[in-house]
Image (cartoon, rainbow, N blue to C red):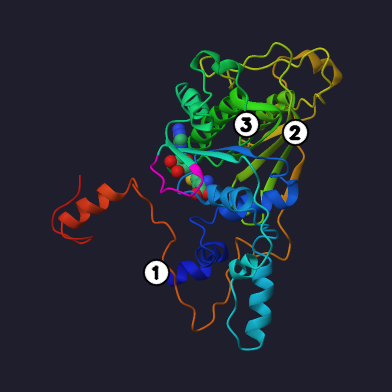
Amino acid sequence: MGKSSKDKRDAYYRLAKEQGWRARSAFKLLQLDEEFNLFEGVTRVVDLCAAPGSWSQVLSRVLIKGEKIGRAGWEDKQAREKLELHGQTTTSRHEQETRQQLQPRENVKIVAIDLQPMSPLEGIVTMRADITHPSTIPLLLKALDPDTFDPTSVQASHPVDLVISDGAPDVTGLHDLDTYVQSQLLWAALNLALCVLKPGGKFVAKIFRGKDVDLLYAQLKIVFERVRVAKPRSSRASSVEAFVVCTGFRPPKGFKASLENPLGAGTQLQVPEDMEVEKTQPSRTLRPDGITELELGSEDEEDSKDIRWIAPFLACGDLSAYDADASYHLPKDHVVLDPVQPPTAPPYRKALEMRKAAGGAYGKTKLG
Ligand code: SAM
């Protein structure tokens, strides 16, 4: 597929390049913030699975530079339509924004982590590490507070206001496998968040809504006051992707998070006696046609160990914003821009090199 057809197909892909974002995912975080005011009172943030870095760019612009970005992907559309009506070209919203008054915050600390190398961003510490590995936590705490970090009190250190995770494995196209690997990344992000969040802290993470997601919601509901599932307008409706937005971190009494013995499908927290949690426990019945039916649990099931809970679901982002699944008309003079930050070490690089060495796509030498 050529560059221009991709531009036409995906408004957010095009908009990201116009506004200088490294990836279209920036709009997902901006639209989540529109709905949940994620950055309110936040100065210390960990961005997990951060490469190529568009979420870190949002953090940098909102927290470090103090920009007010607001209704993502909406004003551009309005401005574009208005000006195109009058035969003019549009001003990008980035230009409009720079005219706004800046309100930078003090003592902002942001650490971005990914398996892949990430091009530097001003004011952000970037680390190449695996979020599933226990050794990442002390590295992260040291990066946040290099002068006061004490390796002997890692367990007692909870200095983070917000943990965000957009983790995704390389998609294989095998739905069940992709959902499973993504859920493992999500549990890893949650366990890491539990180790570093301040009481009252927030956790936002990408999920693929699949089997057993209600089990995850129930675990989240034990450790956070408020748990919501959100689908930003910039996330394609056709994808199973959504985001959990958890606020008010409240570790149960005596709870010690650890990556050595992490929470997950095998290890679960039980609802503490003194905690009020809505115990909605759907029971499952597998129909002969392969569809699993969920039924809300009865009172008798309240003591079941396998507690499930359905989180409220919200669509977010202004309804007037671009629809991620729609195709939009592009003006004849539309210029296709290059990506803001091409991948630094894409896994397909070796394949491209091999193909080139073999004389291109139709070379005589077969790969592999
Ligand atoms: N939020 C990013 C942005 O706005 O640019 C996009 C993230 S991308 C969808 C998913 C990232 O997850 C990839 O860069 C991948 O390397 C990273 N990832 C996957 N598994 C990981 C792991 N175990 N530890 C750290 N990063 C991981």
3D distance between C-alphas at marks 1 and 2: 42 Å
Whether residue 59 is visible to the viewer of this picture, yes or no, is yes
Whether residue 174 is visible to the viewer of this picture, yes or no, is no
Q: Where in the figure is residue 246, as x and y percent of width and height?
A: 71, 35
| Mark positioned earlier in the residue sequence (3 or 1) | 1
Instruction: Assess whether residue 215 is covered by the magenta stretch.
Output: no
Q: In terms of secondary structure, where does tag 1 sit?
A: loop
3D distance between C-alphas at marks 3 and 2: 27 Å
Residue located beneath label 2 in the image: 310
Q: Where in the figure is residue 71, as x and y percent of width and height?
A: 70, 60
Residue located beneath label 3 in the image: 160
Q: Residues within 10 Å of mark 3 (few under 14, many from 20)?
A: many
Q: In terms of secondary structure, where does tag 2 sit?
A: loop
Against 267, residue 75 (above or below) is: below
Q: Residue at x 68, y 40 (%)?
A: 42
Q: Nearer the viewer, residue 313 or 128?
A: 128
The numbered dot on residue 2 is 1
Q: Residue at x 61, y 88 (%)?
A: 87
Q: Nearer the viewer, residue 257 or 148?
A: 148
Instruction: Assess whether residue 122 is covered by the magenta stretch.
Output: yes
Q: In terms of secondary structure, where does tag 3 sit?
A: strand
3D distance between C-alphas at marks 3 and 1: 43 Å
Which residue type does callout 3 highlight?
A: Val
